[in-house]
Image (cartoon, grey):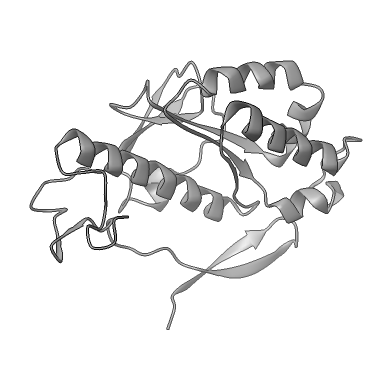
Amino acid sequence: MMKMFPAHHPVLDEVVEFVSPGPGRLRVMRDGKNIIRSQKIPKPVVLVDTREQTPLPLHANHPNWIGGERRTALKTGDYSVDGMRKLLALERKSLADIVSCTVASRERFLEQCERLAGFTWKAILIEATLEDIKRGYGELDIQSEVHPNAVCGTLDAVEARFGIPVIYASSVRELATERAASWLSKHFTYWWLEQNGLGRVLIDSDGL
């Protein structure tokens, strides 16, 4: 039976149950054996930009994936990983943020995207689903005349123009946090394995 956890869904304005993330470490398999312990593969320490006013509780919610957090000034992005500061950047946007970026803060947002494009691994994580955006913003108390199609179109254009993946996560903060923690931990682990001569692969039997 799947383990579930309750969380408030801000769009539905009710408590909804979701499947809990697994409690274990990432699996790194070689010849049928998990080498996490034998190779002393570390968990990433996440760098959180000092301007991030409501940071995602990455370590608090996912200590099995994230080794810790450190607040520091990041020139680009809201999150990076210790040792990968010049390689990896994750930009977090709430739905209110991304609506503003479409018009009011558009120039600044596009400048951010130009900088973000220079990283080897990057993404923009939206704390909303596509459904949340297309439903309009009234249920989330966002007062804006920006058309939802303009928001979606801008994000599609950013991805096509700059090559930055856009992750539509969730308006449920726990789920957005899980998505970010998984993304950061996997990118770090692939990078660490490659740097230590173990190949850029988690599970050797299927090449992933």
Tally of marks: 0
Q: Is residue 24 left or right of residue 30?
A: right
Depth order, front residue of 43/143:
43
Give the residue at x 15% y 66%: 32
Instruction: Examine the rendering and report whether any part of residue 18 can be seen.
Output: yes
Instruction: Examine the rendering and report whether any part of residue 67 can be seen.
Output: no
At which x and y percent is residue 22? 37, 65
Depth order, front residue of 153/144:
153
Give the residue at x 83% y 36%: 150
Give the residue at x 59% y 50%: 169
- Residue farthest along the left direction in this orientation: 38
At which x and y percent is residue 33? 13, 64
The quadrant the N terminus occupies is: bottom left
At which x and y percent is residue 59? 37, 45
At which x and y percent is residue 84? 33, 27
Give the residue at x 43% y 45%: 183
The quadrant the C terminus occupies is: bottom left
- Residue farthest along the bottom direction in this orientation: 1
Q: Is residue 41 left or right of residue 179?
A: left
Q: Quadrant of residue 156?
A: top right
Q: Is residue 167 above or below residue 75?
A: below
Q: Is residue 32 left or right of residue 81?
A: left
